[in-house]
Amino acid sequence: MSLGRTFALALSSAVLLGAGAASAQMPAPKVATSPAAAPAGDYALDPRHASAIVKLAHFGLSHYSMRFNTIAGNYSYDPKKPTASVVTVSIDPNSIDTNDTAFNKEIADKFLETGKFPTLTFTSTKIEEGKGDHGKVEGVLDFHGVKKPVTLDVTYRGSVSAMGKDRMGFSGSTSFKRSDFGAGAYVPIVGDEVTVLIEVEFVRK
């Protein structure tokens, strides 16, 4: 290898390492933990920073996890009237992911019956502020063709303005019996009670 080419490669490596170091040293934006600090407006769910994990029992031996990969949603927010906020979330049940393609299809076909029920939705009806960063979101879950009320326990993670966008973040959880929604296949071999764990960020439009 020529001396010139060696020097060029060394210079390129130095530039890349320098860029990486500069990137690593970028200060993180400050997260505001008070809901009053979040800007009012209409927000859209950021699918890159959202997850819906489902857990249920199998033979009572394990509480295994599955994930829905396709999630969309909207959130309207006014810091002066936070309990008047409205949240809507929709999930494509065909996006169920168990890390096993054949098992994904079995669950979609036999448990979720996605050919008949291609969408799963949640629409809030009431928001209650709790202590600190905790609260409850009551709403209607439309699952497997049945609409029933469910309540999410929610933790507010804060808001931030970064890279020209305003964001709000939440964690949530709920549980219900799938048989209440007409999706009781293989109970009790496969658990009836379903736990849903949600992590989500909304970006102001």
Image (tube, helix red, strand yellow):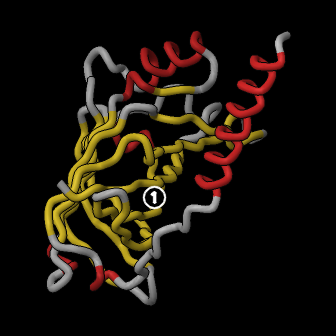
* Residue in the picture at 37% in, 44% down: 180
* Residue in the picture at 51% in, 46% down: 194
Q: Does residue 152 appear left or right of residue 100 in this picture?
A: left
As drawn, 104 above or below 152: above
Q: Nearer the viewer, residue 158 or 91?
A: 158
Q: Does residue 106 appear left or right of residue 140 in this picture?
A: right
- Residue identifier under label 1: 174
As drawn, 17 above or below 157: above
Which three-letter amino acid code belongs to the residue tagged 1? Thr
* Residue in the picture at 66% in, 38% down: 16
* Residue in the picture at 15% in, 60% down: 42
Give coordinates of residue 121: x percent, y percent: 26, 42
Q: Does residue 194 appear left or right of residue 181 in this picture?
A: right
Residue 88 seen by the camera? no
Q: Nearer the viewer, residue 196 or 95?
A: 95
Give coordinates of residue 150: x percent, y percent: 33, 58
As drawn, 186 above or below 63: above
